[in-house]
Image: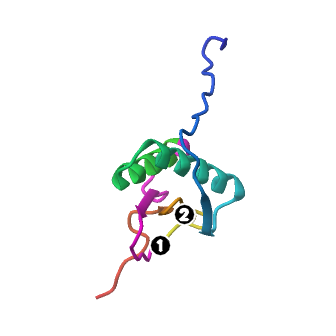
């Protein structure tokens, strides 16, 4: 039984086996493992790609919140089978992984990392 004021951690049990592979990453090993676990849970729980992306993004924002400053940025997530991307990301805050047939890109970026000259 949990002590008062302490929440017991409940682990999610995957309903189906899933394969995964890290395609590219600049994250630390701990962040990579958390991204893999979060992505596995998302793919297991949801079937719609938008729901998978929403879950991964919001879990990372919840687990690793910023101080609220606009200069810190937030997490973004793309999930799909066929797409191209070019993203700017914070140092050591990018991972591209594959879970089953879905490619998942997760990164942290400022709202406006630079200004574009005309």
Q: Earlier in the sequence, mark 1 or mark 2?
A: 1
Name the one closer to the observer, 106 or 50: 50
- Give the farthest residue toward the right: 29
User: How crowded is the residue under tag 1: few (<14 C-alpha within 10 Å), some, or many (20+)?
Assistant: some
**Is residue 33 found left or right of 55 in the rendered image?**
right
Magenta residues, start to end: 63-87
Mark yes or no: residue 105 visible. yes
Identify the residue under disc 1: 88
Magenta span includes 79? yes
Seen from the viewer's position, the closer of residues 82 and 115 is 82
Residue 13, how many percent across, how many down? Answer: 58, 35
On the image, numbered disc 2 is attached to which residue?
A: 98
Taking 77 as reference, is 115 above or below it? below
- Residue most extreme to the left: 118
Q: Residue at x 60, y 21 (%)?
A: 7
| Residue 98, image x, y percentages | 54, 63
For the stretch drawn in magenta, the main secondary structure is loop
Q: Nearer the viewer, mark 1 or mark 2?
A: 2
Which quarter shows the N terminus?
Answer: top right
Give how far across and how far down residue 69 sits, in percent: 45, 52
Mark 1 element type: loop
- The C terminus - image quarter: bottom left
In this view, which residue lies farthest toward the front?
16
Report crowding for label 2: few under 14, some 14 to 19, many 20 or more residues within 10 A (C-alpha): many
């Amino acid at each position: 039984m949990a002590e008062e004021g302490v929440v017991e951690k409940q682990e999610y049990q995957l309903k189906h086996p899933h394969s995964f592979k890290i395609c590219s990453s600049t994250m630390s090993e701990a962040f990579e493992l958390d991204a893999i676990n979060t992505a596995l849970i998302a793919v297991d729980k949801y079937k719609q790609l938008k729901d998978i992306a929403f879950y991964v993004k919001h879990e990372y924002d919840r687990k690793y919140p910023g101080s609220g400053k606009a200069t810190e940025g937030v997490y973004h997530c793309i999930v799909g089978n066929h797409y191209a991307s070019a993203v700017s990301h914070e140092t050591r805050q990018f991972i591209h992984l594959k879970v089953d047939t879905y490619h998942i890109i997760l990164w942290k970026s400022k709202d406006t990392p630079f200004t574009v000259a005309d």
